[in-house]
Image: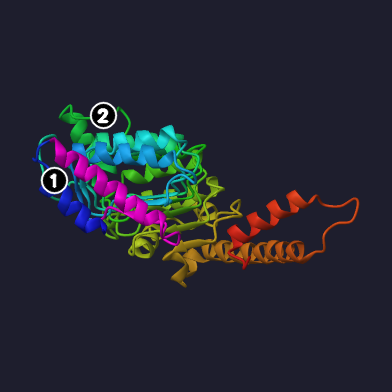
Amino acid sequence: MNATSLAHQGTASAHRPSPAIADRKAAFSAHLAALRSRPGNTTLSLRGQTLEARDIALLAEVLDEQCGLPGGLPFNTIDFTDARLHSPLPLLTVLDAHAGAGITCLDFSGAQSLADGQAQASPAEGLDEPALQAIIGFVGTSTALRSLTLDRQPALGLLPFMGRLAANQFHDLQPPLLRLLAALQGSAVETLALRGCQLSPQDWGNLDNGLRRAALKHLDLEGNDQMATASSADACLTFLVFLCSLDRHPSLETLRLPSQATSWALAGCSKLMKDHPMWPRLALPGNRRLRQVSPLMDSDDQRLAGLRQTLHRNQAQWQQDWERVRTFALCLRDAPAPQGLGLPRELKHRLVGTAIRQLHLPS
């Protein structure tokens, strides 16, 4: 039974008497049992499903039971892409009770919130603020989560938050994006995707402030074309300020910007005087980790030469370091067993195993 048939079964039986609840729970359990029998599959796909409050509660109950089985859950990724769902809080609470349950990736791309008693989500609104807060809370406590995708979630942005604030419909006094980045502080999350979230120029400041405290390695902002326009000098200068701030984010390695970012940067540069203090900051002199800023690296404009040189230097250094670690791992793997004094076997196995996982080497 696949995820789509589960969705149809859950929706069709939403108003049946109590035996249908047992049927839906059995269907969820059977689906997870099928995943357990296919060890190569690492994803629980709930793409496009409609999950009302009872469905979420039943799924949470089944996951709670599955977490108690030997080996835990038979997957490490949950995909809610384009799902229509009631609050994910019960499900995330269960995962949190099991120390994250080994879930390393969550994808809520285009997911829509269902209001209480409704089977239809409001069009184009994405997840509401309480749902985002449930996700943020899980991010702040999970030690296993490595990747979070929140594409097409406009409620993250500052301007929608200000509208909710004015209407007294807010969940917290801080915008969700700032709360999310704060939750990343101390977490294990390395990759955050926020594509097409309708972020605005006002969100650059929240990104700057939040990234200073987060140990994020990869950030994807593609599709947020509202964040600046080449005809708006103020917005382009705000974007340049964010670029300069990358010197203060030592953990960030790759950054994917909206497709118009090069034209924004050049439009901002055209407004700077030759002796403006922002020029040396744009070269990111103190950054040694950031190696990819797309699409800015594709420009050969001399005004971005300093930034481009820094990124090329970082890229070459990263490749050199990777080759050194790879060579060390391979030598360690192939070294003969120590005689007498030497590297303990258990430590050697740990080092080799870690290197193989991180570098994707053949075992």
Q: Give residue 171's mark.
A: 2
Residue at 18% across / 39% down in the picture? 21
Residue at 40% across / 38% down in the picture? 95
- Would residue 346 appear left or right of 7 to someone viewing this image? right
Quarter the N terminus occupies? bottom left
- Would residue 128 appear left or right of 337 to someone viewing this image? left
Tell me which segment is drawn in magenta.
Answer: 18-47
- Would residue 22 appear left or right of 341 to someone viewing this image? left
Q: Position of residue 91 (x, y in %)?
A: 32, 38
Q: Are marks 1 and 2 in contact (CB under 8 Å)?
A: no
Kindly give the residue lying farthest to the right in the view shown: 340
Q: Which residue is mark 1?
A: 121
Q: Nearer the viewer, residue 298 or 234?
A: 298
**SS of the residue at dot 2?**
loop
- Would residue 310 appear left or right of 262 to someone viewing this image? right
Q: Position of residue 328 (x, y in %)?
A: 74, 62
